Amino acid sequence: MADLWVSVAVLGVSVLLSELIRSAARLFQRDYRIYLLEVASTFQLCCCTHELKLLGDSAQLELSYGLALTYTVTLVHLATFQDATCNPTAALESVCRGTRSLRAAGVLIMLQFAAAVAAQSYVASVWSQGLSDIHLRHQSSDFRCFDPLGGTLLEAAVVELACAFVFQAACMHVHKLDARLQVHFIAAVVTAAVYAGGEISGAIFNPVLAFSVQFPCSGHTYLEYCFVYWLGPVLGVVSCILLFEKIIPFLFGGSTAGMDVPAIQKKKTQ
């Protein structure tokens, strides 16, 4: 239990540090503020997921505690991320919809990956302090992580695709709910995805988050991880958009009005 509270404290400090950056972003012009918000929020997402993954892998958390933490941390992310998406697929989607230029999306994605790398260094420095037994054990293994896949590459890619599809669908339809329920609905979807697919792929369904958390692990090549954690989620998002905005309206003569402005942006939170 002591390890759990140390990890909760690490999560809290990571959120507070990111919140300081977001507060400082208010001093800048809107164009620069968007980029700073993206960096801070992606950093927060990756740091928290690193700690949750370590806690789950090393401390053998009871399922109820793990799901409760996932749900709670997701709520915190949704409450603090503001306009940040923390997801390259969201940036690419905005280009396709004409709401962001290709250049701006490219800069945004580069900053997301930079924040993901910064999160790796940050959590390593925190773990090196040996604040808990799981941090000490992880330090003794030189912060190595091992094969994150609990199935074949194809099975893991299908899980990532399915999770991204469900999450995208939730984001596209959440505006239909009462405003007070929206964040809880998204948090519940993320928690359910982690429960359903976590043992097979980790249920990351976010390319930049996977780059920070899963890609450093041994067991598979870089290209294999790209197949699972990049291609899978991208195909999931694309197939979801095509289904709800093209195929279903074509088959039933419906309208796509209101489907392209989700109330909650695509932030993969754990």
Image (cartoon, helix red, strand yellow):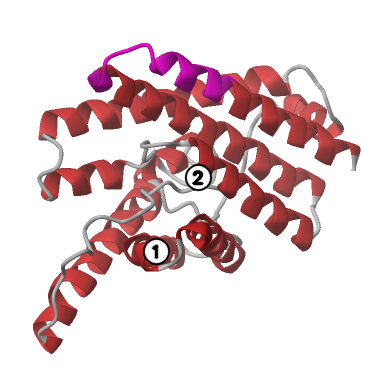
Residue 147 in view (yes/no): no
Does residue 110 sit above or below 49 in this rendering?
above
User: Residue 141: which quarter of the image?
Assistant: top right
Q: What stretch is highlighted in magenta?
A: 17-31
Q: Which mark is residue 174?
A: 1
Mark earlier in primary sequence (2, 1): 2
- Front position in the image: 17 or 176: 176
x%, y% of residue 255?
Answer: 13, 75
x%, y% of residue 86?
Answer: 39, 38
Q: Is the magenta stretch mostly helix, strand or loop?
A: helix
Quarter placement of the N terminus: top right
State the count of labels: 2
SS at circle 2: helix
Instruction: Determine whether, in the image, residue 2 is placed left or right of residue 262.
Output: right
User: Residue 110: which quarter of the image?
Assistant: top left
Where is mark 2, residue-wise? 78
Residue at 46% from the left image edge and 64% from the top image edge: 178
